[in-house]
Amino acid sequence: MTVIKDFKKHNKNIFWSIVNQILIIAGTLIVSILAVRLKGKDFFGDFTFLTSLFGLLFFVAASGTREIIIREVALNKEDVFFSGTKYSFIWSFLGSLFLLIIGFWLKEYKSSQIGTTIMWSALIFPFYTSFQTWMSWYKGKKQYFILAILNAIKLILQISGVVFLMINNYSIMLVVLFFLGIEGVYNLIVCVWIVKKYTQTNQKIFTWKKQSWVLSLMDLSVQIFGKADAVIMGLFFSSTTLAIYAIVMKVIEGFSQIIYSAIQGILPSFYKKENLKIQYFYQYFWWSFVIVIILLPIIKYPIEFLYGGEVNEAVRYTQVYLFSLPFFFLAKISNYFLIKYNLDKDIITNKLLAIGLVLVLYLILIPKYNIMGGIVASYVFFIIQFVLNRNSLKKLKN
């Protein structure tokens, strides 16, 4: 009864937060499905490699400012939105420089088209990354309905353009640059709209920049988990193998993002509530295994229906990976407890250890065991992350 009661208390925010995430998941799934159906597995493999490499550099743009903005806007300190967005934009140009260097290397040693695409994406990077703060604004304001509507508009523009380009057989370079570029322009427009609507008040706020980099390190762990494996897979194996791996990741990402959205929906209240303990969330951990067991025998049907029989190899890998979802939940909620209690040093230490370990595992296991190697490394990442965070919270209690 406690679970149901607490869910009802936050159900409006959770509902629209999940709707928002479902829209994002649906958008990426549609792109992946049509890429496989219209252009083949190799095309989708190259698309995954390019977008993963691009996303891997998110943290360079001080991406942790997005979490800061959610918290501070929830506490009616809206001016952090303006300073945080500007700060992220300035740092994003370092990411553009990295993309130019990486693109030049790829052009010389891997593929001219892939390298050229990465180099051109450097122009898009500042707008795509730093102006995503508009989403944090609406999360902090608990305006998840507006957030969902705005994301729906963005996805319609993004998907319709990408589908048009693929149907008309445009190159992978144009498809990827449009996919990234339209979101960059959209992010800029919405941020400008917020700036015009809200007047800065020069509020007195605490020094947040240091913690933004702590949280950027948290975001780096997310990007390494979701992007580095695909990049390593693309460097060592064929685009077809990467495509199978990407489908497995897309399916599990869909479920993990729904979990993440549910957590996001309670964040404003989570930060305000005193004496909240992580043990309260263990009940959700055990209930999530029930969901996994239900999904296990039926997950093959949507995969084969959406992507076709030629990717049925992805089914068995997805079934193995489903059991990571409960551990994803524990790792994610424990991260927010560290943010709640401003345990910056623990965040840095735990993330460095987790990032270092998963990178080593990716580099060792993926070249040797390909897809299964990436899955095993991800399991270890979630478990180690939770154990480290739990130990940090124990020290706080003492």
Image (cartoon, rainbow, N blue to C red):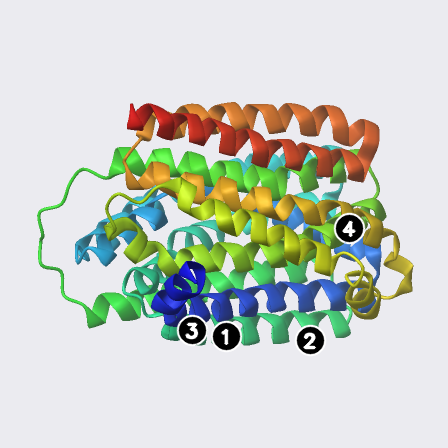
Amino acid type at image mark 4: Gln
In the depicted view, which residue is nearer to us: 142 or 65? 142
Q: Which residue is mark 1?
A: 152
Q: What residue would you read off at disc 4?
A: 319
Q: Nearer the viewer, residue 72 or 283?
A: 283
- Tag 3, which secondary structure? helix
Amino acid type, callout 3? Leu
Question: Decide: marks 3, 1 in contact (CB < 8 A)?
Answer: yes
**Which mark is first along the chain, 2 or 3?**
3
Q: CA distance from mark 3 to mark 1?
A: 5 Å
Tag in front: 4 or 3: 4
Q: Is residue 193 left or right of residue 61?
A: left
Residue 211: x %, y % from top left: 29, 35
Marks 3 and 2, how far apart in space?
Answer: 22 Å
> Is residue 218 visible to the viewer in this orientation of the structure?
yes
- Sequence-first disc among 4 and 1: 1
Q: Badge 2, how many Cα within 10 Å: few under 14, some, many 20+?
A: few
Q: Amino acid at mark 1?
A: Ala
**Mark toward the start of the polypeptide (2 vs 4):** 2
Pointer 2 residue: 164
Q: Quadrant of residue 170?
A: bottom right
First in sequence, mark 2 or 1: give its number: 1
Question: Where is residue 51 shown, x and y percent of the image?
Answer: 62, 50
The part of the image, by quadrant, that contains residue 167 is bottom right
Mark identifier at residue 150: 3
For residue 93, say whether it is visible. no
